[in-house]
Amino acid sequence: MSTRPRENVRVERDLNGHVWREGCSPDSRWTVEKLSRNVHRVTMLCDTAHQFEWWGLLSSDRHHDNAHTNQALERKHLEEITKRKGGILDCGDLFCAMQGKWDPRADRSALRPEYQAGDYLDALVREGVKFFQPYADRFVCIGRGNHETAIHKRHETDLIERLCAGLSNGPVPVHSGGYGGYVLFRCITKKGGSYSFKIRYFHGSGGGAMMTHGVLDTRRHASIYPDADMVITGHSHHHWVVPIARERIRQFSGKAEVTIDEQLHVRIGTYKDEHGDGFGGWSVEKGLPPKGLGAVWMRLHIAGKQGEYRLAAEVTRAQ
């Protein structure tokens, strides 16, 4: 478990109860509010627009408790987002939770020693809190995936809600999200400028789409999430980035113009290596391809020319 010094992280609470974290831009800070059960807002205050940037770690399918998960890579990225003074948006399946005696998929070789106990589900939460506690102040929200919803359905316990409760014992609350939801980013400058960026997250669905890697989902998602500037998904353990250009109509001061913008679609990979050297196991026997490990870095910044500034995102692999 990390022992990063807590004094390097500035956290302040205002009179309205908002907990502010220090940002990486000069004289900047940010906070998270839960507007509804699956809508969160990140408000970022900064000095000037041209100096602003905010880093996010977009993660999914950590399967943190599985023996095949690369926890060293997880920790590396958690340490890096801490140095960048940014936040984490997790899209579900943080837990694998498949090794209980009730599960026909259970594999003793995938059971880490710390989970070999009679209170398996309790151990998942207990060990998860231990691992992620040093980074609790980094989380924007933690969504649910099909592995967590399956446990909730069959065993009437909510692993994500329990994890967030355990991580919220410190000065910063950790919010849970849904299987899908929105994170609304708002950047406000000292001169009164206000810029927004909307992310729709959805854990994902389907059987993995071996030939297309799920890229065809982008057209469906673009049609049903028209308000989102970015759509992020996981589930299949693939990684790709697909921008989709859109024609928009803009009206102002009695005039109108046709403009083009982009909706960015990002599929996030995994920290779990099911393929290994290809010797055997479920993934190999099903003929599934190996998957690249890691997550996605997102850099929010102010783009465009003066008078037409907008909050924009750049994404790169975190591997």
Image: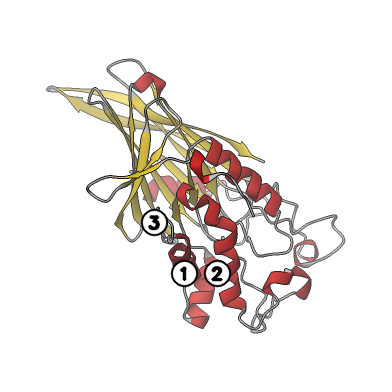
Task: Between residue 181 and residue 51, name the one nearer to us.
Answer: 51
Task: Between residue 38 and residue 45, name the one nearer to us.
Answer: 45
As drawn, which residue projects farthest toward the top? 306
Color theme of the render:
secondary structure
Element type where label 1 sits in the image: helix
Residue wearing tag 3: 173
Q: Sequence order check: which comes first, mark 2 or mark 3?
A: 2
Left/right placement of residue 124 relative to residue 159 reads right
Q: Residues within 10 Å of mark 3 (few under 14, many from 20)?
A: many
Residue wearing tag 2: 125
Give the x, y percent position of residue 273: 73, 55
Q: Are discs 1 and 2 less than 8 Å apart at CB?
A: yes
Element type where label 2 sits in the image: helix
When asked about the image quadrant of residue 99, the answer is bottom right
In the rendered image, the quadrant that contains the N terminus is: bottom right
Q: CA distance from mark 1 to mark 2?
A: 7 Å
Residue wearing tag 1: 162
Please, what is the three-letter code of the amino acid marked with disc 3? Pro
Give the x, y percent position of residue 82: 53, 41
